[in-house]
Image (cartoon, coloured by chain):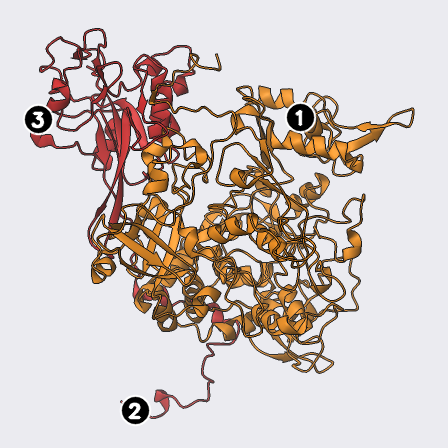
Chain colours: A red, B orange
């Protein structure tokens, strides 16, 4: 059984928000749109985004990490938003595991948003329906797009390739391999929701310097006569030691 | 601070702003002391082994000794500099067959002139720049500086990359492979935009050269049209005679002075350009000094002007270092004399795609288009998008029609040039009538050549009558079509043997010369020691070959900063500030979600950053009783700003910072007067000045690097304190709201939902 998901590498996300705006650009005009904005040019602008980047600091100066954390619907394998829906509008697709909302059935009651422990759902205040990430379901199967572009808009946009997309149930997929190799983890596993999306943690590369690497046979100062050998006739231990 | 790219770094090394030069000098010190430098690279590919004259009293002190008996094949660039050959212990011309230069030592030429290799002078210079010295200045522990130097040096020496790519160097020696070392550096305005930025970036270039990481695998790679000669050939005029009515300027507007005689000054040594670029005040101002223009024009120094035309520069706000003063100067009138009551800058034309803070000051606004509505080129003549593998350039083709009366600025310029009968923009027909030569911008781009018949134009791809040529070739009437068919990009991958060591790669130079990227095919030897800078210093000391000499009041400045070797000095603004009263550095960064200030009023982008905070270390903020999210003042010797504080552990405690250009003036950018941008957002520019405090003679000088004129954006010193409880919860300063521009809607939409194909552009 296929479970499509995003794997987001926090080791390379620089927080540029290209995924945020390209998501909105694609989806506001797609099957999940529109995505409205209130007070667009006035005080306290607010609007619908399927993907947001949160930035937070970890640790105290100077041992501080600044983490840019992109967050969207995690397409849980056991999504708490689905059983609470009174109309059956929220559903999980059997064929690819994508969690979707059928706007024709949604009555905007927000039960699903209360049930979602990740805050991934966004009510559209004007259409009065609940919206969220669809994994760009209207891109990824579109035969009119070149095969290389049948990916979510956020994945296409990421300049540092921090976002991977694929089937986490296929052990040979790029995403499964990344989760295995780089310590991929799911958010709040204690809730038992089994989020499909995973995050790859910060990884540190360190250089160890060994003392002998600094004592160099190839020291170029020797060539310029800066580390001269003592003259043969200079006093030596040989001359005075008889044991 | 730790944001953006430093956020994902394996190691963050916090440093005090403006002290990067000290860190880099200490790294160089360690690498040289420890013998971790790449001697072969320095000897063969830099001027490390060139002999520098040490005859202190001489007119040519500090210049490089040459073999004058050898004929110079290339004007402008000498290649007959001397080495002291280690094997035969005598002076030889550089790269003489079988020779290997001493990089250290001191020698005497046949005529008795004492000389030292450039590398010896560099080593002498670096002597005092110990990690302990740098630790005091930068705030980075000496042990960390040492470790960084060792990591760089050992990696460069021991992790050699070797690619099986044969190539031939400029001296005809064949190499079976290309080697390199995996150490690369990336720096931009964080290092450069200080009044000591030139020597900082120069030190970085020297550090890269010491490690041998220039255009080698793993290191800093060139992109066409680089590498260019040192200094590049392009020159501005060097006399006011070059400026004549109804006559094209005899030279380029921007160029690269190679010695004092190339400066664009009059007989008295005064600046010819309004911005004083290429004058004794800012001799190597290769980007011009736009940040000086308004102040200079207002003051009438070097002269007054009647018209100022501004394109896409928000000088009444975030593009000016001194936004408040600039706003005052733009509206200032003569108080007395014959011009009484007239504006000091009489006529102001502003071309912008948006109703920025600047348009409010304009006599004439020319509404520009955005990128989506016009043709553009990313040209080989300017800043192409080349890759390491070879030249790349690109075009933009409009995807939506311009709105209203908007017209691309490039069309405006071509229209003006045609109407003003600029020679390059008019043609004479059979009847002897002149007519404009270019129909529009796309026509200009296709048909313009740098000189008649040169075959060099804006775009390198699909040249020649049928598009069969590249780099050089006659204009191709179907060039735009061919770019459009190729995704708007032209790319010419070079053969692998031309992709590395391009400063000294014979094959590459032959190719670059054939395709006219370069005039000459000579090697581009890296200047560890800058003879160009020394010629300016000599002129300041009344010596040298050049006839131009700095005016007396600038001699000391030129002699100090035109040091042929890198050195460290505290930023000029910091030197002029009271360090006790203003103990903190204040800097800005551009938010990655925005492109400059353009578009940051966009309905989606302003939800990402609708206002900005001042980021302050909790240690620093608590000392002043400032709460997280609380209101505070930040004050420099030039001005003060009220803003909101955000505690951050990701900032060096002696530094405060904020996002640039999020704050906007009330009513600008078609945002409502109560928009967060003007009420909670702020501009740090109000704390910065475009000029340093006047010296004892009342002489004022730009707050810029004395060598290049690069604006010292990040040099300001500040103090912070808590805002009083009764103060308004709004940022300060505030400005009277700009009136809505004619033709803009009276009402503001309460909400919107964009759906492609359903709006104005179906």
Which mark is drawn over residue B190?
A: none
Chain holding disc 3: A
Is B610 in front, or is B486? Answer: B610
Vertical relation: A71 (above or below) B719: above
- Tell me if I can see residue A78 in this picture: no
Quadrant for residue B656, please give it.
bottom left
* Residue picked out by circle 1: B442
Task: Say which element carries label 3.
Answer: loop
Image location of residue B680, percent across then percent down: 32, 43
Q: Are marks 3 and 2 in contact (CB under 8 Å)?
A: no
Which mark is drawn over residue A192?
A: 3
Q: Nearer the viewer, mark 3 or mark 2?
A: 3
Chain holding disc 1: B
Task: Say which element carries label 1.
Answer: helix
Label 3 neighbourhood size at 10 Å, few (<14), some (14-19), many (20+)?
Answer: few
Image location of residue B318, percent across then percent down: 46, 46
Residue appearing at x 59%, y 79% in the figure? B106
The answer to whether A163 appears left or right of B76 in the picture is left
Is B220 in front, or is B163? Answer: B220
* Residue picked out by circle 2: A242
Task: Say which element carries label 2.
Answer: loop
Q: Earlier in the sequence, mark 3 or mark 2?
A: 3
Both on one chain, marks 1 and 2? no
Q: CA distance from mark 3 to mark 1?
A: 60 Å
In the orientation shown, which residue stands out farthest toward the top? Answer: A104
Both on one chain, marks 3 and 2? yes
Image location of residue B729, percent across then percent down: 27, 46
Q: Nearer the viewer, mark 3 or mark 1?
A: 1
Is B328 in front, or is B704? Answer: B328
Quadrant for residue A137, please give it.
top left
Q: How many marks?
A: 3
């Amino acid at each position: 059984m296929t479970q499509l998901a995003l794997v987001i590498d926090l080791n390379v996300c620089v927080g540029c928000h290209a995924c945020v705006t390209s998501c909105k650009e694609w989806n506001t005009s797609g099957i999940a749109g529109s995505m409205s904005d209130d007070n667009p040019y006035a005080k306290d602008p607010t609007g619908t985004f399927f993907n947001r980047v949160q930035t937070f600091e970890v640790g105290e100066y100077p041992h501080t990490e600044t983490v840019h954390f992109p967050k969207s619907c995690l397409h849980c394998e056991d999504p708490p938003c689905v059983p609470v829906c009174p109309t059956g509008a929220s559903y999980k697709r059997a064929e690819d595991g994508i969690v979707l909302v059928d706007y024709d059935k949604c009555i905007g009651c927000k039960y699903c948003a209360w049930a979602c422990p990740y805050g991934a759902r966004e009510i559209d205040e004007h259409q009065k329906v609940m919206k969220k990430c669809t994994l760009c379901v209207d891109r990824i199967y579109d035969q009119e797009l070149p095969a290389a572009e049948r990916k979510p808009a956020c994945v296409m946009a990421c300049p540092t390739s921090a976002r991977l997309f694929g089937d986490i149930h296929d052990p040979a997929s790029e995403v499964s391999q990344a989760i295995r190799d780089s310590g991929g983890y799911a958010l709040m596993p204690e809730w038992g929701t089994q989020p499909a999306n995973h995050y790859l943690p910060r990884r540190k590369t360190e250089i160890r310097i060994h003392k002998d690497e600094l004592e160099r046979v190839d020291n170029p100062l020797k060539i310029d006569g800066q580390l001269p050998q003592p003259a043969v006739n200079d006093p030596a231990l040989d001359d005075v030691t008889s044991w | 601070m730790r944001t953006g790219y430093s956020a994902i770094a394996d190691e963050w090394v916090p440093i005090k702003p403006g002290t990067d030069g000290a860190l880099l000098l200490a790294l160089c010190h360690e690498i040289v002391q420890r013998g971790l430098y790449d001697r072969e690279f320095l000897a063969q590919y830099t001027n490390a082994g060139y002999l520098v004259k040490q005859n202190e009293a001489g007119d040519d002190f500090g210049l490089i000794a040459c073999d004058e008996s050898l004929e110079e094949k290339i004007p402008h660039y000498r290649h007959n500099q001397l080495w002291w050959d280690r094997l035969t212990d005598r002076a030889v011309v550089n790269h003489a067959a079988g020779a290997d230069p001493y990089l250290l030592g001191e020698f005497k030429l046949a005529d008795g002139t004492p000389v030292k290799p450039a590398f010896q002078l560099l080593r002498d210079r670096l002597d005092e720049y110990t990690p302990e010295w740098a630790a005091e200045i930068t705030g980075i522990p000496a042990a960390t500086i040492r470790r960084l130097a060792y990591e760089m040096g050992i990696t460069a020496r021991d992790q050699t990359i070797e690619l099986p790519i044969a190539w031939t160097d400029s001296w005809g020696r064949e190499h079976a492979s290309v080697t390199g070392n995996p150490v690369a550096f990336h720096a931009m305005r964080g290092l450069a935009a200080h009044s000591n930025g030139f020597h900082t970036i120069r030190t970085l270039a020297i550090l890269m050269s010491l490690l041998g990481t220039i255009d080698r695998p793993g290191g800093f790679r060139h992109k066409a049209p680089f590498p260019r000669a040192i200094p590049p050939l392009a020159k501005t005029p060097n006399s006011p005679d070059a400026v004549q009515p109804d006559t094209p300027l005899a030279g380029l507007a921007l160029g690269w002075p190679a010695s004092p005689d190339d400066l664009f000054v009059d007989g008295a040594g005064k600046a010819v350009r309004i911005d004083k670029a290429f004058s004794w005040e800012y001799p190597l101002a290769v980007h011009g000094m736009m940040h000086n223009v308004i102040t200079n024009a207002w003051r009438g120094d070097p002269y007054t002007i009647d018209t100022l035309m501004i394109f896409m520069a928000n000088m009444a706000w975030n593009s000016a270092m001194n936004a408040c003063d600039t706003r005052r100067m733009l509206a200032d009138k003569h108080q007395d004399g014959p011009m009484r009551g007239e504006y000091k800058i009489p006529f102001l034309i502003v071309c912008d795609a948006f109703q920025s803070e600047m348009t409010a000051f304009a006599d004439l606004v020319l509404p520009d288009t955005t990128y989506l509505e016009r043709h553009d080129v990313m040209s080989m003549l300017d800043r192409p998008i080349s890759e390491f593998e070879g030249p790349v350039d690109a075009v933009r083709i409009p995807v939506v029609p311009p709105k209203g009366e908007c017209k691309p600025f490039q069309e405006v310029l071509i229209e003006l040039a045609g109407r003003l009968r600029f020679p390059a923009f008019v043609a004479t027909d059979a009847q002897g009538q002149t007519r404009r030569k270019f129909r529009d911008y796309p026509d200009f781009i296709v048909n313009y050549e740098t000189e008649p018949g040169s075959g060099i134009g804006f775009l390198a791809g699909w040249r020649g009558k049928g598009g069969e040529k590249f780099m050089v070739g006659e204009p191709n009437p179907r060039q735009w079509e061919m770019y459009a068919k190729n995704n708007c990009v032209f790319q010419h991958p070079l053969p692998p043997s031309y992709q590395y060591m391009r400063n000294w790669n014979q094959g590459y130079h032959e190719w670059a010369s054939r395709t006219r990227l370069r005039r000459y095919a000579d090697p581009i030897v890296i200047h560890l020691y800058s003879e160009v800078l020394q010629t300016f210093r000599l002129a300041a000391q009344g010596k040298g070959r050049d006839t131009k000499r700095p005016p007396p009041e600038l001699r000391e400045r030129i002699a100090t900063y035109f040091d042929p070797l890198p050195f460290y000095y505290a930023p000029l603004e910091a030197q002029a500030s009271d360090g006790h009263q203003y103990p903190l550095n204040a800097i800005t960064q551009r938010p990655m979600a925005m492109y400059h200030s353009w578009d940051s009023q966009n309905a989606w982008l302003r939800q990402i950053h609708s206002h900005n905070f001042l980021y302050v270390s909790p240690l620093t903020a608590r000392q002043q009783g400032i709460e997280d999210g609380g209101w505070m003042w930040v004050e420099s010797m030039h001005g003060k700003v009220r803003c909101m504080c955000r505690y951050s552990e990701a900032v060096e405690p002696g530094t405060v910072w904020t996002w640039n250009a999020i704050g906007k003036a009330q009513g600008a950018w078609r945002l409502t007067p109560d928009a967060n941008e003007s009420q909670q957002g702020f501009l740090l520019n109000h704390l910065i000045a475009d000029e340093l405090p006047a010296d004892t003679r009342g002489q004022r000088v730009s707050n810029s690097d004395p060598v290049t004129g690069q604006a010292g954006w990040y040099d300001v010193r500040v103090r912070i304190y808590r805002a009083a409880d009764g103060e308004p919860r709004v940022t300060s300063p505030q400005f009277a709201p700009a009136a809505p521009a004619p033709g803009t809607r009276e009402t503001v939409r309460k909400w919107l939902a964009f759906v492609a194909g359903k709006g104005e552009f179906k």
